[in-house]
């Protein structure tokens, strides 16, 4: 196993760096670096730039407009984008529903939906979780019954990320309440403009409107919006989750956050000296940096195995736990580095177009809200406790 990058991979890294230098708008990178809110238009702008370069659909096969990149190239691309301060890709369309449509969709579904995802015409959200069906997703109750050439959908989804921007939602619905839990579920594509859909915001600890509840009241969905076979939606659901969990360690994002932490610790002072020279604080930064290096090495080992034909198994659970804990530890240290200056929560300083004088420093507005926001990392995408169960079963054989 060789965990070093090949000369071709190193050349690819340089190509990505050059592209980012010439194409990533400065104002977008600045917003990302300062932890400002990103508007829908910010995401769309960056997505369009990537699409024009042919680098938006990194997980798609070439024949559908994808890059055809190897896992190592995708890793390099993610790392360089995070280092340059590029906006995170909103995955629901391009990296979640699209692979399902490519694998299980009809030719008509592929022809209609895939180009709309590539062009940014459609913004998708994910309708999996429900009150009472999160970790135990197969318990979901949202019901769809057949009425002629339509399904009629009733129920509720929750935690629907950025559903307020979406014009489409992919949903797991129960089509056979009499079957075993996993066997009576179907995968439906639903237009958010359909009468009977209500989106209600959930405001999180950091004051953000990132997630929503979505209610379905006799929503009529054409049967041609079913993906795969009726009652076989669990297969699509699991396939999608393997794509959702890819790259969850977020190495590039943690590296960029660590750099920001160091910048803050250099600028802040304690007893007249830069905080980064304080032995206690320095040791805490070093500890988190070593954990990050270790998880990066593990990622490279797994990538090397995948490059040699292997399939990642319980290792992705390990990376998810480590990656999310590291990111949370970094945001915690940023908050500590700022001390009382992390406390004021001034929403207007996080607005995308804020250009006034910050209350303290331009880097001090975001860390407190990021600290709260990053709590989500150990919950979504399969909570860390569930990942530990997977490791216990698959690795420790308990
Ligand atoms: C910010 C955010 C965004 C999200 N976005 C989306 C989205 O866009 N679309 C979507 O469908 N969902 C989304 N989710 C939902 C997410 O997938 C669920 O929150 C997650 O699956 C956990 O489910 P739950 O919240 O119902 O908690 P529960 O499953 O009720 O779990 C509660 C606690 O019990 C623990 N637990 C549960 N079962 C076990 C077990 N068997 N063994 C050990 N511990 C266990 C969990 O780890 C957790 O700590 C989002 C969640 C968050 C926080």
Image (cartoon, rainbow, N blue to C red):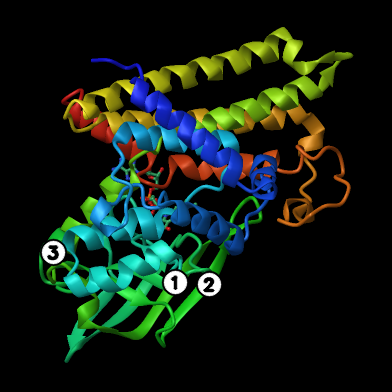
Label placed on residue 200 = 2
- Residue 139: x %, y % from top left: 25, 60
Q: Residue at x 44, y 39 (%)?
A: 378
The answer to whether any part of residue 368 appears in the image is yes
Labels 2 and 3 touching (C-beta < 8 A): no
**Disc 2 + disc 1, Cβ < 8 Å:** yes
* Residue at the spot 23% in from the left edge and 29% down from the top edge: 306
Q: Position of residue 291 (x, y in %)?
A: 48, 18
Q: Position of residue 126 (x, y in %)?
A: 38, 62
Question: Which residue is tagged 1?
Answer: 214
The first of marks 2 and 3 along the sequence is 2
Task: Specify the quadrant of the image occupied by residue 208.
Answer: bottom right
Q: Measure how far apart labels 2 and 3 are at the Cα level.
A: 29 Å
Rendering quarter of residue 197: bottom left
| Relative side of 262 to 376, left or right | right
Query: Pointer 3: what residue?
Result: 232
Using the image, determine if residue 222 lies above or below residue 397.
below
| Mark 2 to mark 1 CA distance (whole Å) | 6 Å
Q: Which residue is at 42% across, 22% downward?
A: 296
Q: Secondary structure at mark 1?
A: strand
Q: Reply above or below: 99 against 107.
A: above
């Amino acid at each position: 196993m060789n965990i070093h990058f090949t000369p071709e991979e190193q050349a690819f890294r340089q190509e990505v760096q050059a592209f980012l230098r010439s194409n990533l708008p400065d104002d977008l990178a600045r917003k990302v670096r300062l932890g400002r809110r990103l508007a829908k238009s910010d995401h769309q702008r960056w997505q369009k730039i990537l699409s024009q370069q042919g680098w938006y659909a990194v997980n798609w096969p070439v024949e559908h407009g994808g890059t055809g990149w190897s896992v190592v190239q995708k890793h390099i691309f993610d790392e360089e984008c995070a280092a340059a301060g590029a906006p995170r890709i909103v995955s629901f369309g391009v990296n979640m529903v699209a692979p399902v449509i490519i694998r299980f969709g009809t030719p008509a579904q592929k022809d209609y939906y895939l180009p709309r995802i590539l062009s940014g015409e459609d913004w998708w959200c994910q309708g999996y979780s429900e009150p009472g069906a999160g970790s135990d997703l197969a318990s979901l109750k949202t019901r769809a019954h057949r009425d002629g050439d339509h399904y009629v959908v009733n129920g509720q989804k929750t935690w629907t990320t950025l559903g307020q921007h979406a014009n489409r939602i992919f949903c797991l619905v129960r089509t056979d309440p009499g079957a075993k839990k996993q066997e009576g579920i179907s995968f439906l594509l639903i237009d958010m403009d359909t009468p009977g859909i209500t989106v209600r915001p959930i405001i999180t600890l950091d004051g953000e409107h990132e997630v929503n509840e979505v209610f379905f009241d006799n929503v009529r969905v054409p049967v041609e919006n079913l993906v795969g076979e009726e009652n076989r939606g669990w297969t699509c659901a699991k396939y999608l989750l393997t794509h959702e969990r890819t790259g969850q360690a977020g190495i590039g994002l943690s590296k960029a956050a660590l750099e920001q932490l160091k910048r803050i610790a250099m600028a802040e002072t304690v007893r007249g000296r830069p905080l980064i020279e304080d032995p206690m604080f320095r040791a805490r930064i070093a500890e988190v940096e070593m954990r990050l290096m270790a998880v990066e090495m593990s990622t490279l080992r797994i990538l090397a195995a995948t490059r040699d034909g292997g399939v990642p198994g319980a290792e992705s659970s390990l990376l998810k736990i480590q990656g999310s804990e590291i990111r949370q530890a970094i945001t915690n240290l940023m908050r500590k580095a700022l001390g009382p200056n992390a406390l004021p929560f001034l929403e207007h300083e996080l607005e995308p177009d804020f250009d006034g004088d910050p209350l303290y420093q331009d880097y001090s507005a975001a860390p407190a809200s990021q600290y709260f926001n990053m709590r989500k990392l150990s919950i979504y995408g399969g909570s860390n406790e569930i990942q530990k169960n997977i490791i216990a079963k698959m690795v420790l054989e308990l």
